[in-house]
Image (cartoon, coloured by chain):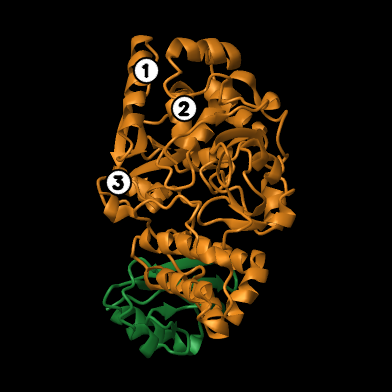
Amino acid sequence: MSKTATVRTKKTVQTKTVRTKIRLNPAVCDGFGFCCEILPEVIGRDEWGFPVLGDGTVPQSLRRTAEQAVAFCPRKALWLETTGCLGTTGRVERTRTR
Amino acid sequence: MTTLEAIRTRTARLLGDDAGWGTSDLGAHLRRHGPLALPQRFGAGWTDRLLDEIERSGLTGRGGAGFPSHRKLRLVRSAGPRSRPVLLVNAMEGEPASGKDRFLVGSSPHLVLDGAALVAGVLGAEKIVVCIPDDRPELGRILVGALRERDGAGWSSTPVGIRPLAGRYIAGEESALAAGVNGRPGVPEYRPDKSVPVTMGRTVTIVHNVETLAHVALIARHGADWFREVGTAEAPGTCLVTVSGAVERPGVVEVATGTPIDEIVGLAGPTRPVQAVLVGGYGGTWVSGEELTTPYGPGALRSVGGSMGAGVLVALPVEACGIRETERIARFMAAESAGQCGPCLFGLPALADDLRAIARGAGGQQAFDRLLGHCEAVDGRGACRHPDGVVRLVRSALKVFAGDLAGHLRGSPCGGSEKASLLVLPPVGHERR
């Protein structure tokens, strides 16, 4: 199972805007297609069965599902990229989770 | 392209008047270009000065991507002092229609080795590895001879190795080259951020094309202002171009960047009217007969959808079928795919099949729509740019050969589709070995 992406926050920080994108290494992907079935809202499928990610933006509501799609990839070809902008500091953090 | 000759031009800097295979020994090289004499010219901190000089010269990479050379050097320098980098000298030249790199190595090995030594000096490189295709042992012999001469003259500072690698289309791609040198299969790696230097284990590598290095050797001798005397502002200097197709003297020509395409093809003596020219390489662009006055430089080529690529021009005669020739290239490129990414592995043969159906006049509008769909499905979905290049070529063919295309779609193919190809189409990678 994957570890959850964490956004490091200072104690005082309350507001945060987090953007999550799902990413794919096409050289590793073998087109099992689990991700397309788990996360069809974001991941399409081409005529050969390989996932089509577009720009890969994952809506917050599908965040957990996206983590499952990453976890279920037999080739471990997927990951989530999180860009978080913390309200008070304005600090941008990128975390990559497997 | 078995026989190669230099076509003489007035702008020759890299290629001498007597350029030809095996004509360059160290003595002749020094008589022609003079000594390097770096400390005398630039003082003690010559590596920084040379880097500034390269930046001022505006030199761009001549391997295909056209990336500014000084930026590449600075990126590797700023990658940190974790370990000393390794300079990979790229003479793989996987483009079947290109011969300029092996011509340069064969005729001016010392100029290439000068440039490699200079870049290695700028980067404090641990070693230089010259990568040559394993089916061209003659390049290895010439380089070994040249290195022996340099050793004898006491010129060796950075160790230089020669590494024959399995020669296939994609083997020269930066990350594929590094993998090959590292003893792994020479296939590209997925690199979303191309500005991060390629590494071999923990070692940072820098890949430079042989022509780029030869230009560095001349910039070090004559300076940036001299370099910029000819060529366009965006990509100054001269460039080597391999001209083939319907020409009397297929070969390597050195011209100032920005020379009109038809003028360059003219130097090789077109045998009959030219319908279009393939520009850049097999992942390049067709440029139509009406646009052949376009200067061979980055800006002007961009306006017709192309780039200088690997310095390839193939003249397509008026009687040939552009659709059929594009299909042949797509077929070759499909076979040269590393087969790592689904869209490339399945998409490139699909593109070739669609083009075949259209060329036969059998597919009609359906085949055309399928082709457009496949272009969309393949574009930008590989780990490297190999599939993107094929899509670019196919899309340019649809535009440039629109007239022919209409006939093919109506079911009346042009007479050219059954003619033999003028293209260089070597047996694909796995059959070569």
Mark 2 vs mark 1, CA separation in Å? 14 Å
In the displayed structure, A40 sits above or below B18; it is below
**Three-letter amino acid code of the residue under disc 3:** Ala
* Residue B353 higher or lower than B201, as above or below: below
Dot 2: chain letter:
B
Could you tell me which secondary element the residue under label 1 belongs to? loop
- Indicate the amino acid at tag 2: Val
Q: CA distance from mark 1 to mark 3?
A: 27 Å
Name the residue tied to disc 1.
B156
Q: Colour of chain A?
A: green
Q: Nearer the viewer, mark 1 or mark 3?
A: 3
Residue type pointed to by label 1:
Ser
Q: Chain of mark 3?
A: B
Which quarter of the rendered picture does the N terminus of chain B lie within? top left
Q: Are marks 2 and 3 in contact (CB under 8 Å)?
A: no
Residue B163, given in percent of the width and then of the height, sits at 30, 36
Q: Nearer the viewer, residue B3 or B174?
A: B3
Q: Which residue is mark 3?
A: B166
Taking depth in this image into account, of B245 and A32 the one nearest to the observer is: B245
Whether residue B243 appears in this view of the structure is: yes
